[in-house]
Image (tube, rainbow, N blue to C red):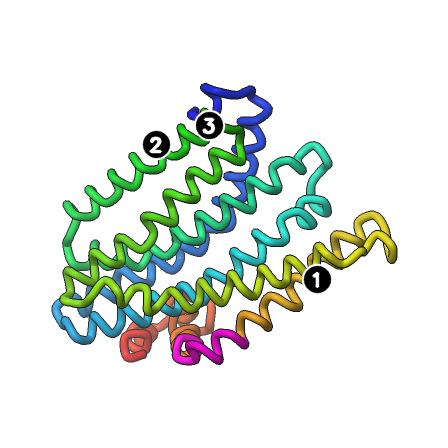
Amino acid sequence: FILGVFHSTTIVGYYFFAMSLTIQIILPLTATTGSVFLPILSRISDQRDRYHAAFRKILGCYTVLIMPLTLCLSVSSIPLFNILFPADWQQAAAVFAVLLIGESMACMSVPGVQGLKSQGQFSVLWKFQLVQLILAVVLMSIGGFLGEALAVAIGLTVSRCLMAPVSCMILMRVIGGRAREVFQEVAIPIGSGVVSFAAAGLAAYMVPWNTLVDGWMVDLLQLVLIVLIGFPGYLILMLVFQRRSIRDLMELGRPILLKLGLGGSTDSGNEDRLMDT
């Protein structure tokens, strides 16, 4: 609606297409993990020390998992669009890349939102979501006035980046922790993801592929190089600077899959095993 006030239906179509793809990628991640976090945190909501430790572990693992997936798709948006979609939709590739960064940051708020629900802080949660909505509308409106679909996407992404850690910081204060603990959990995964996939993108786009191959092979080689550099680079940086989060993710992975019914039997003991982890 905001974009349509200032621009043509073609520009709106590019934005809508990019946003639809972004939602299809992000929504399954947030919906499934959110269904796990809320009951687990609710069961230990009155055990302050255990709750604090569990939330920090969940936040760290969630960020470690989300960042490389979304940043890889964002950096490789151009070759992906060239391979998968007609040429008419190529202008949506940059919009998709920017939106995906914003929504990946917004995913960081999922543990915080579920944590506020588990603590019964619904009035605080309502105020947080209202402020988040107002900020997004204001920045998207500025983007729509100054530019086109990409500018609106940048406005939304800026609002997501500003508000993403807020719900987690609020929850930390509620449970007696400190806001800086949120940044201690997420700073290294985000920084590692940005560095590794920025390097992968530079390597993929700077190689003169056109002198070697042509057509869709250029896009395929760029995509392969981004994956081969980005993911190993991310893993190496995480092992060097925050090995604990990788270990925690490996410990939580199996119980969460069991809880979701994806890793074997789904008996009543799966939730207890996840609680223990």
- How packed is label 2: few (under 14 Cα within 10 Å), some, or many (20 or more)? some
Q: Quadrant of residue 62?
A: bottom left
How many callouts does the rendering have? 3
Query: Is residue 123 magenta-colored?
Result: no
Circle 3 SS class: helix
Instruction: Name which residue lies at 24% across and 58% down.
Output: 169
How far, Cα to Cα, is label 1 from label 2?
A: 38 Å
As drawn, the label of residue 144 is: 3
Q: Which of 73 and 259 is in front in this view?
A: 73
| Image quadrant containing the C terminus | bottom left
Q: Nearer the viewer, residue 28 or 186?
A: 186
Describe residue 68's horizontal placement relative to residue 111 as left or right. right
How far from the left and from the top, in percent, is residue 238? Answer: 48, 74
Query: Residue 73, can we see it?
Result: yes
Q: Is residue 250 visible?
A: no
* Residue 37: x %, y % from top left: 30, 62
Query: Which residue carries the number 1 mark?
Result: 224
Indicate the secondary structure of the residue bearing disc 2.
helix
Residue 107 percent location from the top left of the image = 39, 54
Counting from the top left corner in percent of width and height, residue 129 is at 26, 42
Nearer the observer, 126 or 181: 181
Residue at image coords 41%, 29%: 142
Circle 2 residue: 138
Residue drawn at the location 20% of the way across and 66% of the way down: 178
